[in-house]
């Protein structure tokens, strides 16, 4: 089984088509340039890192 992936689309038409095919992109830059795509991916990855929180209870319970 493949591990989950994050999908990026460089423009709205591609984003729309991917969604129609059942694969909505998580990353779509505002501008359709390669530089903006790279920045959007980096921003997404940075935000993704902040979403995970580990909780450890002193009693061993959650």
Image (cartoon, rainbow, N blue to C red):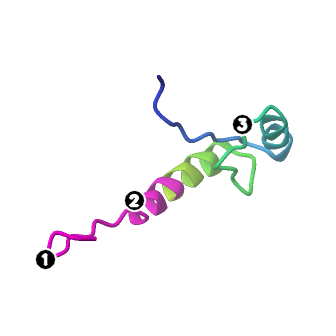
Q: Is residue 58 magenta?
A: yes
Of helix, strand and loop, which one carries label 2? helix
Label 2 to label 1: alpha-carbon separation: 25 Å
Q: Where, by quadrant of the figure, is residue 56 drawn?
A: bottom left
Q: Main secondary structure of the magenta part?
A: loop
Quadrant position of the C terminus in the picture = bottom left
Return the residue at label 2: 49
Return the residue at label 3: 23
Return the residue at label 1: 58
The x, y position of residue 60, in whole percent, is 16, 69
Q: Are marks 3 and 2 in contact (CB under 8 Å)?
A: no
Q: Is residue 29 magenta?
A: no
Label 1 to label 3: alpha-carbon separation: 41 Å
Of helix, strand and loop, which one carries label 1? loop
Q: Is residue 59 left or right of residue 2?
A: left
- Viewer-nearest residue: 38 or 22: 22
The x, y position of residue 38, in whole percent, is 56, 46
Q: Where, by quadrant of the figure, is residue 16 drawn?
A: top right
């Amino acid at each position: 089984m493949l591990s989950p992936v994050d999908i990026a689309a460089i423009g709205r038409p591609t984003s729309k088509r991917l969604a129609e095919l059942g694969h909505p992109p998580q990353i779509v830059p505002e501008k359709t340039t390669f530089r903006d795509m790279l920045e959007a991916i980096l921003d997404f990855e940075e935000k993704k890192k902040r979403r995970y929180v580990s909780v450890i209870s002193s009693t061993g319970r959650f």
